[in-house]
Structure formats: C-alpha cells, structure tokens
Image (cartoon, rainbow, N blue to C red):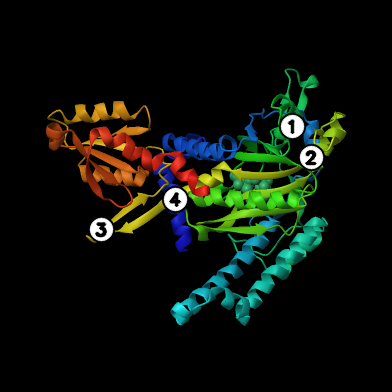
C-alpha cells in the first residue's frame, strides 16, 4: 500500500507542479493519453537530449534520422505487425473489465516475488552484518520454492503464448485462481488476441482512400531508410541509425499513468552489424545502455536485466532493462538481437535489395541488427518517481523535494530578490538576463524567501540564487543547493561556472566511461 500511496503522490505532484496533465481534461480526459506541461516538456526534452548526445553525438558511427509517422501500409505487413502485433486479452464477465492475460499472470508472480523480498528483509534483520543475500536466496528452502514457482509459471506462459495456445493461458489463470484485481471475481471469458495498431485513412475521397496505420514503433522507419542512410552517409558496418519520435498502440489496459500510454514516444537505435557478431554486440549494448542509466545516479539497485523467455518472431536474443517503479520492477528499455529478419522482410515485400557491400570481404550481405529501444515517457516516469522524496528536517518539519538529476531539471536556477524593493529586483532580473543565454532560469519574487525555497525544491530546481542588501555593497549573492540545502556566498560573476559545473551534460555523461 505504501507504494500505492507513493504512486498517487507522484501523479498529483506531476500535475500540481506543471509536469503532466491528463489530455483533454476539460472534456473529462482521454484514457491513457497525456499532455506534458510547462515543466514536463522541458524535462522530457532534456531526457531526449541526454539520450541523443550519448547515442548520436558521442558515437562517430551512429547517425540520427527523423522519419514520418505515416508509412506505406505494406511496411506493417513486412514487419509482422499486421499478423502478429497482438496482445492476449481476457474479459471478466462480472465486472466487464478487460485485462491482458499475460499481465494478470505476471502480476501474480510479482506477488510471489514480494514474498521473497519479505523473507530477505526478515533474514537481513536477523543476521545483521553477517547476512549474505546471494547465499540466502539460493539456499533458503522457502525462497527457493517461491522462485521455482515463478519460473514454472512464466515458462509455461511463455511456451503457451509462443504456441498460440490461448486455452492453456486461460487454464493457467484458472489454476492459479487469479481473480479480477478490482472485484475479486474469477468468472473469465476465453483469451483472445487483439491487434494493437491504430488504423487511419489517407486521401480525400472515401472510395480512393488508402488504409494506413499510425506507426506502433519507430524502428521500421529506420529499416526502410537503411540503404539511403548507408549510401548518403558513406557508413561502414558496424554503424547505427537512431531516432526519437511518437508511436501509437491501442493498449488493452492502460493504467499506471504514463507507464502505458496509447500515444507515446520512443528513443530507438538500430545497429547494423556483420552476421555472426550479434552475441558480442548484444553484450556490448546491454552494458553500454546500463552505463547510460547509471550515469544519472538513480541508484544501481533500481535496475535489473530480465532476459526474455518468449522471444519475438524477429529476435535471437532479447533482454529488458527493468526499473523499480513505485508499482514494482517493470520494463523500461528493450535490447533485442533482431537478426536480418527486418531487412530480409523488406527486401521480399518491396522487391528492392537492402544489402551491404563489404569492401574488406569483397562480398555483399544482409546485415544483422541489434536494437536498443527505450520509452521516453517511461524514462520520464522513472526519473520523476525516483526523484520525489519527503525529507524529515532537523527542526521536525518535512520538505517535499524533487531530486531530479541536475542535468535533466527543467529549471536550473531560480533567482530570488530577498525583498521587492531597494533595487534588489533589478539586480535579480539582470542576473536572469545574463544567465538565460546558457540555462533555463526562473525569476521568483512572491512570498517569503523560505517559501520560495520550498517551492523550488518541489519543482526540482537545483539552485536558488538570492539577492540581498549585501549584494548592493559587494556584488555577491547567496547560492543554495537543492539537495544539501547548503548556502554559500559567491560573486555574481562566478554564477555561470558554478551552475555549469553541475548541470553540464559532459559532467554527467563522462560517468559512462
Ligand atoms: P510492454 O511489454 O510493457 O508492453 P513492449 O515489450 O511491448 O512493452 P517494446 O515494443 O519493446 O515494448 O517497446 C520498446 C519500449 O517502448 C519499451 O521498453 C517501453 O519503454 C516503451 N513502450 C512500449 N509501449 C509503451 C506504452 N504503451 N506506453 C509507453 N511506453 C511504451
């Protein structure tokens, strides 16, 4: 329940501080569609930039593109989405609520996992410093039993889904006595497949209109441009093509705020490699992407890899980077070894060759592909939910602080005149004028300075700069740090460098080395 409360706080904080609004709110909203507000748009842009810099700017052999959302409909035939981009759905006959059958089963396993966590915590307490977690997990009979049960359930579900044996998926739900989480009813329909793509039409007259899909992933825009980019960019294998952009999925169950949306944004990179080298590159990108996450300092324990039991039709290896969201560990990013499936399919459906001529080998081949695919909105939720904390202070009060990594914070510094007179606002505004060339900064003169500090803490602003009467004498100001609340007297002329040292992308991305 505590986690539920934390999640509710995250959602209301996101609204109250201008990060995320429900779409079409004045019309009672649109389910699983969200708008990013004044601060949210900045945070989202900063996350996107942080990814782009790490993937495109820092890698000589990766370039970025921006392909259209509308694409030729045959692309989705070739990619397998028309025939196989389905989720297994199940309805509860009493509550009339619809669920993803696989998610019901995964949630059941998450509950067993919570029991494991409980056992570990109890043992940790009992054994103190002598506690060896790895040994405990692998030897404690109760924990081993729980883990075996999870493995057994997930493996059976994986096999049934792979074999399209939907009757067995339902049988599993019944055997596990899984109930509707909202009503407790176990009166289920059969499991059916449901295609997640949104259809639309291109063309002015109904009879000549062409049926199109809104893209359900950005990856295909990269595959169909593979040869264009390779030739015009004179790219040599191995090389990557990256892009960020909107994707659309008619998700069956869209709860959990911006974790599962019907319109969302992806940041994907397809890395084209020589066939046979996919294992090494899979390991390389697993490690590299995890380093990127860790560079942001959200806590290494909050991430884990989850290798897929059930591989998608195009993959020969796949793993998820999972993050500990307020509702538990869930997929944040996927890393997939996609073989030559996509390029071969597009060759077959378009009738055009999509091969690479390797000058060293003097031979042509269809490259293999390694993909890294992360949801920008999920990354937003990871960063935002991790950052929101309630802190007990020494004077028995609490403060709400949004400890966003400074490089991602929407506003880097707030400039506050101590009082609204004696020329202090003019100096503060001049500081804003000087700093805004380099950083997004805010001017804030309303309320007592203590309240302004709290407001900026809750907003995630890493620095507050206060102009007071001493400033008139010696051109110094107080700079207060959001996380430590430490205050220092510094020269106005030093502000830019002090802020830069903490918010600069280089300072953060270098941690990947
Ligand atoms: P899930 O199993 O959670 O539905 P997926 O395995 O279908 O996700 P991919 O197709 O691998 O997801 O997409 C890559 C990334 O895009 C995911 O790791 C996730 O971060 C993001 N993503 C996918 N679907 C959504 C969605 N509906 N809303 C927000 N982000 C999403």
Q: Looking at the picture, how far across and down is residue 351, in whole percent? A: 87, 29
Vertical order, 263 against 277 (above or below): above
Residue 226 has which mark?
A: 1
Which residue is the site of mark 3? 397
Q: CA distance from mark 2 to mark 3?
A: 60 Å
Which residue is the site of mark 2? 367
Which residue is the site of mark 4? 10
Question: Helix, strand or loop at disc 1?
Answer: helix
Question: Helix, strand or loop at disc 3?
Answer: loop
Horizontal side, residue 257 vs residue 187: left or right: left
Give the class, few, some or many, for how many residues have Cα within 10 Å of label 3's Cα (few <14, many ≥20).
few
Q: Is residue 258 visible?
A: no
Question: Helix, strand or loop at disc 4?
Answer: helix
Q: CA distance from mark 2 to mark 1?
A: 10 Å
Would you identify the image quadrant in which residue 464 lies? top left
Q: Which circle's residue, 2 or 3, is located before the other in the chain?
A: 2
Q: Which one is in front in this view, the residue at disc 2 or the one at disc 3?
A: 2
Q: Looking at the picture, how far across and down is residue 15, in whole percent? A: 42, 42
| Residue at position x 20%, y 28% in the image | 427
Horizontal side, residue 139 vs residue 189: left or right: left
Q: CA distance from mark 3 to mark 1?
A: 58 Å
């Amino acid at each position: 329940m505590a986690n539920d409360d934390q999640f509710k706080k995250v959602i209301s904080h996101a609204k109250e501080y201008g990060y995320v609004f429900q779409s079409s709110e004045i019309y009672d909203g649109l389910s699983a569609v969200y708008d990013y507000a004044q601060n949210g748009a900045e945070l989202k842009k900063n996350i996107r930039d942080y990814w782009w810099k790490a993937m495109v700017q820092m890698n000589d052999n990766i370039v970025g593109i921006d392909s259209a959302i509308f694409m030729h409909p045959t692309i989705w035939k070739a990619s397998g989405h028309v025939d196989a981009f389905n989720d297994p759905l199940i309805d509860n006959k009493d509550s009339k609520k619809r669920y993803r059958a696989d998610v019901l089963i995964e949630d059941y396993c998450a509950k067993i996992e919570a029991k494991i966590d409980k056992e570990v915590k109890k043992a940790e307490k009992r054994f103190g410093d002598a506690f060896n977690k790895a040994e405990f997990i692998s030897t404690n009979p109760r924990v081993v039993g729980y883990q075996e049960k999870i493995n057994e359930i997930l493996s059976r579900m994986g096999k049934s889904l792979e074999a399209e044996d939907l009757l067995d998926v339902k049988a599993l739900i019944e055997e596990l006595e899984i109930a509707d989480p909202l009503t407790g009813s176990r009166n289920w329909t059969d499991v059916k497949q449901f295609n997640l793509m949104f259809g639309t039409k291109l063309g002015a007259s109904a009879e000549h209109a062409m049926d199109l899909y809104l893209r359900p992933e950005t990856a295909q825009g990269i595959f169909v441009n593979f040869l264009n980019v390779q030739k015009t960019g004179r790219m040599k294998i191995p090389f990557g093509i990256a892009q960020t952009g909107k994707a659309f999925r008619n998700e069956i169950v869209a709860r959990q705020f911006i974790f599962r949306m019907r319109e969302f944004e992806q940041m994907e990179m397809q890395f084209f490699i020589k066939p046979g080298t996919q294992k090494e590159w899979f390991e390389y990108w697993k490690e590299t992407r995890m380093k990127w996450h860790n560079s942001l300092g959200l806590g290494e324990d909050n991430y884990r890899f989850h290798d897929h039991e059930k591989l998608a039709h195009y993959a020969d290896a796949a793993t998820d980077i999972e993050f500990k969201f307020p509702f538990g560990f869930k997929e944040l990013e996927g890393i997939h070894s996609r073989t030559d499936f996509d390029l071969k399919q597009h060759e077959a459906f378009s009738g055009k060759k999509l091969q690479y001529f390797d000058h060293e080998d003097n031979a042509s081949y269809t490259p293999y592909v390694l993909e890294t695919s992360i949801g920008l909105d999920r990354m937003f939720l990871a960063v935002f939910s991790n950052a929101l904390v309630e802190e007990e202070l020494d004077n028995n009060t609490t403060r709400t602080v949004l400890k966003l990594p400074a490089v991602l914070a929407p506003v880097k510094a707030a400039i506050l005149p101590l009082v609204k007179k004696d020329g202090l606002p003019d100096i503060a505004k001049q500081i804003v004028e000087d700093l805004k060339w380099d950083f997004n900064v805010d001017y804030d003169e309303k309320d007592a300075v203590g309240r302004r500090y709290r407001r900026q803490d809750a907003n995630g602003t890493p620095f507050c700069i206060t102009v007071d009467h001493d400033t008139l004498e010696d051109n110094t100001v107080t700079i207060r740090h959001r996380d430590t609340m430490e205050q220092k007297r510094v020269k106005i002329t030093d502000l830019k460098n002090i802020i830069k040292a903490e918010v600069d992308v280089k300072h953060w991305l270098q941690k990947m080395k």
